[in-house]
Image (cartoon, coloured by chain):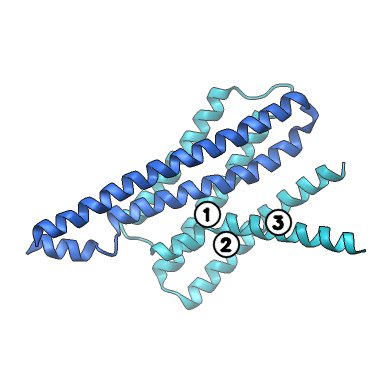
Protein backbone atom coordinates (compact mmCIF):
# COMPACT_ATOMS: atom_id res chain seq x y z
CA UNK A 1 0.00 0.00 0.00
CA UNK A 2 2.80 2.36 0.94
CA UNK A 3 4.56 1.58 -2.31
CA UNK A 4 1.41 2.48 -4.26
CA UNK A 5 1.13 5.79 -2.41
CA UNK A 6 4.75 6.60 -3.08
CA UNK A 7 4.22 5.78 -6.76
CA UNK A 8 1.34 8.26 -6.94
CA UNK A 9 3.38 10.92 -5.15
CA UNK A 10 6.35 10.30 -7.43
CA UNK A 11 4.11 10.49 -10.50
CA UNK A 12 2.69 13.83 -9.35
CA UNK A 13 6.13 15.31 -8.71
CA UNK A 14 7.50 14.12 -12.06
CA UNK A 15 4.41 15.39 -13.89
CA UNK A 16 4.73 18.79 -12.15
CA UNK A 17 8.40 19.10 -13.05
CA UNK A 18 7.98 18.07 -16.67
CA UNK A 19 4.79 20.14 -16.99
CA UNK A 20 6.33 23.45 -15.95
CA UNK A 21 9.52 22.65 -17.86
CA UNK A 22 7.72 22.03 -21.15
CA UNK A 23 5.45 25.03 -20.62
CA UNK A 24 8.38 27.34 -19.90
CA UNK A 25 10.19 25.98 -22.97
CA UNK A 26 7.21 26.65 -25.25
CA UNK A 27 6.40 30.03 -23.75
CA UNK A 28 10.04 31.06 -23.94
CA UNK A 29 10.18 30.24 -27.64
CA UNK A 30 6.86 32.01 -28.26
CA UNK A 31 7.85 35.14 -26.37
CA UNK A 32 11.27 35.17 -27.98
CA UNK A 33 9.73 35.04 -31.45
CA UNK A 34 7.26 37.82 -30.55
CA UNK A 35 10.00 40.09 -29.22
CA UNK A 36 12.24 39.30 -32.20
CA UNK A 37 9.49 40.33 -34.62
CA UNK A 38 8.74 43.50 -32.66
CA UNK A 39 12.37 44.58 -32.42
CA UNK A 40 12.91 43.94 -36.14
CA UNK A 41 9.84 46.02 -36.92
CA UNK A 42 11.04 48.76 -34.60
CA UNK A 43 14.47 48.81 -36.24
CA UNK A 44 12.85 49.27 -39.66
CA UNK A 45 10.31 51.82 -38.51
CA UNK A 46 11.07 53.52 -35.16
CA UNK A 47 7.92 55.68 -35.38
CA UNK A 48 5.79 52.54 -35.03
CA UNK A 49 6.92 52.10 -31.41
CA UNK A 50 3.45 52.75 -29.95
CA UNK A 51 1.68 50.30 -32.27
CA UNK A 52 4.30 47.61 -31.73
CA UNK A 53 4.30 47.98 -27.96
CA UNK A 54 0.55 47.51 -27.58
CA UNK A 55 0.36 44.61 -30.03
CA UNK A 56 3.32 42.88 -28.42
CA UNK A 57 1.94 43.53 -24.93
CA UNK A 58 -1.29 41.75 -25.78
CA UNK A 59 0.56 38.84 -27.38
CA UNK A 60 2.99 38.51 -24.49
CA UNK A 61 0.17 38.63 -21.92
CA UNK A 62 -1.56 35.76 -23.73
CA UNK A 63 1.64 33.68 -23.90
CA UNK A 64 2.57 34.44 -20.29
CA UNK A 65 -0.82 33.39 -19.01
CA UNK A 66 -0.19 29.91 -20.44
CA UNK A 67 2.98 29.63 -18.40
CA UNK A 68 1.17 30.82 -15.27
CA UNK A 69 -1.52 28.18 -15.86
CA UNK A 70 1.18 25.52 -16.09
CA UNK A 71 2.79 26.82 -12.89
CA UNK A 72 -0.55 26.62 -11.09
CA UNK A 73 -1.16 23.07 -12.34
CA UNK A 74 2.31 22.04 -11.17
CA UNK A 75 1.81 23.61 -7.74
CA UNK A 76 -1.59 21.95 -7.44
CA UNK A 77 -0.09 18.58 -8.39
CA UNK A 78 2.47 18.87 -5.61
CA UNK A 79 0.62 20.71 -2.84
CA UNK A 80 -3.10 20.46 -3.45
CA UNK A 81 -3.60 17.38 -5.60
CA UNK A 82 -7.01 15.71 -5.36
CA UNK A 83 -5.03 12.54 -4.63
CA UNK A 84 -3.11 14.17 -1.76
CA UNK A 85 -5.56 13.10 0.93
CA UNK A 86 -5.56 9.50 -0.31
CA UNK A 87 -1.78 9.42 -0.48
CA UNK A 88 -1.40 10.86 3.03
CA UNK A 89 -3.86 8.29 4.34
CA UNK A 90 -2.01 5.45 2.62
CA UNK A 91 1.38 6.65 3.89
CA UNK A 92 -0.01 7.02 7.39
CA UNK A 93 -1.16 3.39 7.56
CA UNK B 1 -3.25 57.11 -37.87
CA UNK B 2 -6.33 54.90 -38.02
CA UNK B 3 -4.17 51.91 -37.11
CA UNK B 4 -2.74 53.68 -34.06
CA UNK B 5 -6.21 54.55 -32.84
CA UNK B 6 -7.16 50.88 -33.11
CA UNK B 7 -4.16 49.96 -30.95
CA UNK B 8 -5.04 52.58 -28.35
CA UNK B 9 -8.68 51.55 -28.39
CA UNK B 10 -7.75 47.91 -27.94
CA UNK B 11 -5.45 48.66 -25.02
CA UNK B 12 -8.02 50.87 -23.29
CA UNK B 13 -10.70 48.23 -23.81
CA UNK B 14 -8.51 45.46 -22.37
CA UNK B 15 -7.38 47.46 -19.32
CA UNK B 16 -10.92 48.53 -18.47
CA UNK B 17 -12.44 45.11 -19.13
CA UNK B 18 -9.81 43.49 -16.87
CA UNK B 19 -11.06 45.41 -13.85
CA UNK B 20 -14.72 45.07 -14.81
CA UNK B 21 -14.45 41.30 -15.31
CA UNK B 22 -12.53 40.94 -12.05
CA UNK B 23 -15.21 42.85 -10.12
CA UNK B 24 -18.07 40.95 -11.78
CA UNK B 25 -16.42 37.57 -11.17
CA UNK B 26 -15.65 38.46 -7.54
CA UNK B 27 -19.21 39.64 -6.88
CA UNK B 28 -20.72 36.56 -8.54
CA UNK B 29 -18.30 34.34 -6.61
CA UNK B 30 -19.16 35.95 -3.30
CA UNK B 31 -22.84 35.27 -3.91
CA UNK B 32 -22.76 31.83 -5.48
CA UNK B 33 -19.49 30.18 -4.38
CA UNK B 34 -17.48 29.43 -1.28
CA UNK B 35 -15.06 31.82 0.41
CA UNK B 36 -12.00 29.97 -0.92
CA UNK B 37 -13.34 30.13 -4.47
CA UNK B 38 -14.00 33.89 -4.21
CA UNK B 39 -10.57 34.49 -2.69
CA UNK B 40 -9.09 32.52 -5.59
CA UNK B 41 -10.88 34.71 -8.12
CA UNK B 42 -9.73 37.91 -6.42
CA UNK B 43 -6.13 36.75 -5.92
CA UNK B 44 -5.75 35.32 -9.44
CA UNK B 45 -7.42 38.33 -11.05
CA UNK B 46 -5.26 40.79 -9.14
CA UNK B 47 -2.07 38.90 -9.99
CA UNK B 48 -2.69 38.88 -13.75
CA UNK B 49 -4.13 42.40 -13.91
CA UNK B 50 -1.24 43.96 -11.98
CA UNK B 51 1.17 41.86 -14.07
CA UNK B 52 -0.42 43.21 -17.25
CA UNK B 53 0.02 46.83 -16.14
CA UNK B 54 3.61 46.26 -15.04
CA UNK B 55 4.39 44.53 -18.34
CA UNK B 56 2.96 47.50 -20.22
CA UNK B 57 5.10 49.96 -18.24
CA UNK B 58 8.24 47.90 -18.81
CA UNK B 59 7.60 47.48 -22.54
CA UNK B 60 6.70 51.14 -23.02
CA UNK B 61 9.97 52.25 -21.47
CA UNK B 62 12.05 49.60 -23.19
CA UNK B 63 10.78 50.25 -26.73
CA UNK B 64 10.38 54.01 -26.69
CA UNK B 65 12.93 55.69 -28.95
CA UNK B 66 15.31 57.55 -28.79
CA UNK B 67 16.38 56.34 -25.30
CA UNK B 68 15.21 52.76 -24.81
CA UNK B 69 15.88 51.12 -21.42
CA UNK B 70 18.84 48.77 -21.11
CA UNK B 71 18.13 45.07 -21.79
CA UNK B 72 19.51 44.18 -18.34
CA UNK B 73 16.97 46.29 -16.50
CA UNK B 74 14.11 44.93 -18.65
CA UNK B 75 15.15 41.33 -17.95
CA UNK B 76 15.64 42.04 -14.25
CA UNK B 77 12.16 43.55 -13.94
CA UNK B 78 10.69 40.65 -15.94
CA UNK B 79 12.22 37.99 -13.71
CA UNK B 80 11.39 39.87 -10.50
CA UNK B 81 7.76 40.19 -11.62
CA UNK B 82 7.54 36.52 -12.51
CA UNK B 83 9.27 35.46 -9.29
CA UNK B 84 6.88 37.48 -7.12
CA UNK B 85 3.84 36.11 -9.01
CA UNK B 86 5.15 32.56 -8.58
CA UNK B 87 5.83 33.11 -4.89
CA UNK B 88 2.33 34.47 -4.26
CA UNK B 89 0.78 31.54 -6.16
CA UNK B 90 2.98 29.10 -4.23
CA UNK B 91 1.87 30.52 -0.86
CA UNK B 92 -1.80 30.62 -1.88
CA UNK B 93 -1.81 27.01 -3.10
CA UNK B 94 0.53 25.37 -0.60
CA UNK B 95 -1.21 26.91 2.42
CA UNK B 96 -4.62 26.14 0.93
CA UNK B 97 -5.96 29.69 1.19
CA UNK B 98 -7.72 29.45 -2.18
CA UNK B 99 -9.57 26.90 -4.28
CA UNK B 100 -7.97 25.89 -7.57
CA UNK B 101 -11.15 26.55 -9.59
CA UNK B 102 -11.40 30.12 -8.33
CA UNK B 103 -7.74 30.70 -9.06
CA UNK B 104 -8.28 29.55 -12.65
CA UNK B 105 -11.23 31.89 -13.09
CA UNK B 106 -9.17 34.76 -11.69
CA UNK B 107 -6.13 33.99 -13.80
CA UNK B 108 -8.30 33.90 -16.93
CA UNK B 109 -9.43 37.52 -16.52
CA UNK B 110 -6.83 39.00 -18.88
CA UNK B 111 -7.25 36.22 -21.45
CA UNK B 112 -11.03 36.71 -21.38
CA UNK B 113 -10.74 40.47 -21.81
CA UNK B 114 -8.33 40.08 -24.75
CA UNK B 115 -10.77 37.60 -26.30
CA UNK B 116 -13.64 40.06 -25.78
CA UNK B 117 -11.57 42.89 -27.28
CA UNK B 118 -10.88 40.74 -30.35
CA UNK B 119 -14.58 39.92 -30.73
CA UNK B 120 -15.42 43.61 -30.37
CA UNK B 121 -12.96 44.61 -33.08
CA UNK B 122 -14.11 41.82 -35.40
CA UNK B 123 -17.71 42.90 -34.92
CA UNK B 124 -16.75 46.47 -35.68
CA UNK B 125 -14.90 45.48 -38.88
CA UNK B 126 -17.81 43.33 -40.08
CA UNK B 127 -20.37 46.06 -39.45
CA UNK B 128 -18.17 48.76 -41.05
CA UNK B 129 -17.77 46.58 -44.14
CA UNK B 130 -21.51 45.93 -44.25
CA UNK B 131 -22.18 49.70 -44.19
Q: Quadrant of the N terminus of chain A?
A: bottom left
Chain to which mark 1 belongs: B
Residue at horizontal 50%, vertical 37%?
A28
Is residue B97 or residue A92 the one in the foreground?
A92
- What's the residue at 82%, 46% (across, down)? B5
Question: Going by the picture, which residue comes out furthest to the right?
Answer: B131
- Residue at 58% across / 55% down in the picture? B111
Identify the hue of chain A. Answer: blue
Q: Of A34 and A50, which appears nearest the observer?
A: A34
In the image: residue A55, left or right of residue A63: right
Earlier in the chain: of badge 3 and badge 2, it is 2
Does residue B127 appear in the picture of this structure? yes
User: Residue B118 got which mark?
Assistant: 3
Pointers 1 and 2 in contact (CB under 8 A)?
Answer: yes
Instruction: Categorize mark 2 by other alpha carbons within 10 Å: few (<14), some (14-19), many (20+).
Output: many
Distance between mark 1 and mark 3 Cα atoms: 22 Å
Mark 2, chain letter? B
Q: Residues within 10 Å of mark 3 (few under 14, many from 20)?
A: some
Instruction: Please identify which colour was used for chain B in the image.
Output: cyan
> Residue pushed farthest bottom?
B32
Q: Earlier in the sequence, mark 1 or mark 3?
A: 1
Chain under callout 3: B
> For the residues carrying marks 1 and 3, which lies nearer the camera in this image?
3
Tally of marks: 3
Same chain? Circles 3 and 2: yes
Q: Secondary structure at mark 2?
A: helix
Q: Residue at x 83, y 44 (%)?
A: B3
Residue carrying label 2: B22
Residue A53, located in which quarter of the rendered image? top right
Which residue is the site of mark 1? B46
Amino acid sequence: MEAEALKILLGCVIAAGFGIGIAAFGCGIGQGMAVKGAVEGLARNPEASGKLTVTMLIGLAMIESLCIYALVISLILIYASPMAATVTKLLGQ
Amino acid sequence: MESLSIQKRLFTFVTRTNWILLCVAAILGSFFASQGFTLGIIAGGLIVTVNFHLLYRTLKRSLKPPYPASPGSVLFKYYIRFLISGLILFILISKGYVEAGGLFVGLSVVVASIFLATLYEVKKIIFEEAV
